[in-house]
Structure formats: C-alpha cells, structure tokens
Image (cartoon, grey):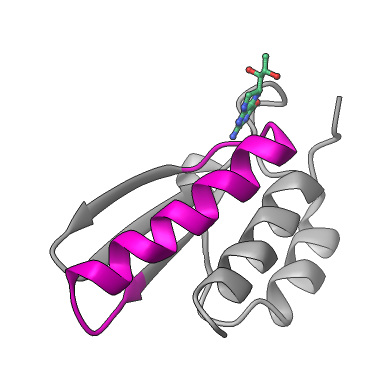
Amino acid sequence: MSKKLDTAARAAALKDLHGWRDDPAKDAIVKTFVFGDFVQAFGFMTKAALVAERMDHHPEWSNVYKTVNVLLTTHDAGGLTMKDIELARAMNLAAGL
Ligand code: H2B
C-alpha cells in the first residue's frame, strides 16, 4: 500500500502540479478544471477515467456543464499519497496542460 506523504513531500509534490491546491482538512488535493463546453469537460472525464481505472486509483469528482471539480486522496491510506500526485499529473495531461 502507498504511504501517506509527510508535510515536506506534500509541498514538494504540489509545487509543480499546475492548478492543484492542498485541502488539509480532507488530507487531499483539489482542482477545478474549466473547459470550453460540456463536450470538452466530458471528454476529459472519459480520458481521466480510463487512466484512473488502469491505475486502480479513483477520483472523487463532480461535473456541472463545463466545470469538473476533482478531489484526490487515497482511501486505503487515509490521506494523500504519491498515487494521488501521479493521478493529478495524468489528469493535467488529459486536460492538455
Ligand atoms: N482509489 C482511491 N482514490 N483510493 C483508494 O484507496 C483506492 C482507489 N483503492 N481505488 C482501490 C480502488 C481499492 O479499493 C481496490 C480494491 O484496489
């Protein structure tokens, strides 16, 4: 199982993760993706879902029209791990960032 990141590792990992914020209360990272329209938002979710399934690591997310809110945390570990950082990177790539 992945190990929870300590404060220093968390800050270091977040530094080069464009657009992601710390959510310490939930021991998670969060990002709001805003696309041009619903089709782009849903296209992103489709790509991200396939990556998530391949990684066996799944986002908590919601979609309203062209906005996708994402929260990443590792349920098995009870907090943030490298798996969340890896999925966040993959989601940025899926969004074309
Ligand atoms: N996703 C996330 N975000 N955290 C987990 O701990 C997790 C998961 N565990 N996806 C996986 C599935 C686990 O439940 C299965 C059995 O591997």
**Viewport quadrant of the N terminus:** top right
Question: Where residue 89 appears, x then y in whole percent?
Answer: 68, 67
Horizontal side of 97 relative to 68 (left or right) equals: right
27 or 84: which is nearer to us?
A: 84
Percent x, y of residue 92: 58, 73
Magenta segment, which residues? 33-59
Which quadrant holds residue 64?
bottom left
For image coordinates 18% across by 77% down, the residue present is 37
Q: Quadrant of the C terminus?
A: bottom right
Q: Is residue 22 magenta?
A: no
- Horizontally, is 26 left or right of 76 in the view? left
Quadrant containing ligand 1 reads top right
Relative vertical location of residue 22 with respect to residue 12 in this rendering, above or below: above
- The reply to whether residue 93 is visible in this rendering is yes
Query: Is residue 72 visible to the viewer in this orientation of the structure?
Result: no
Please name the predominant secondary structure of the magenta segment in the image. helix
The residue depicted at 85 percent of the width and 33 percent of the height is 2
Q: Residue at x 68, y 44 (%)?
A: 80
Reply above or below: 31 against 83. Answer: below
Q: Residue at x 59, y 82 (%)?
A: 18
Q: Does residue 43 show up magenta in the picture?
A: yes
Q: Position of residue 74 (x, y in %)?
A: 65, 34
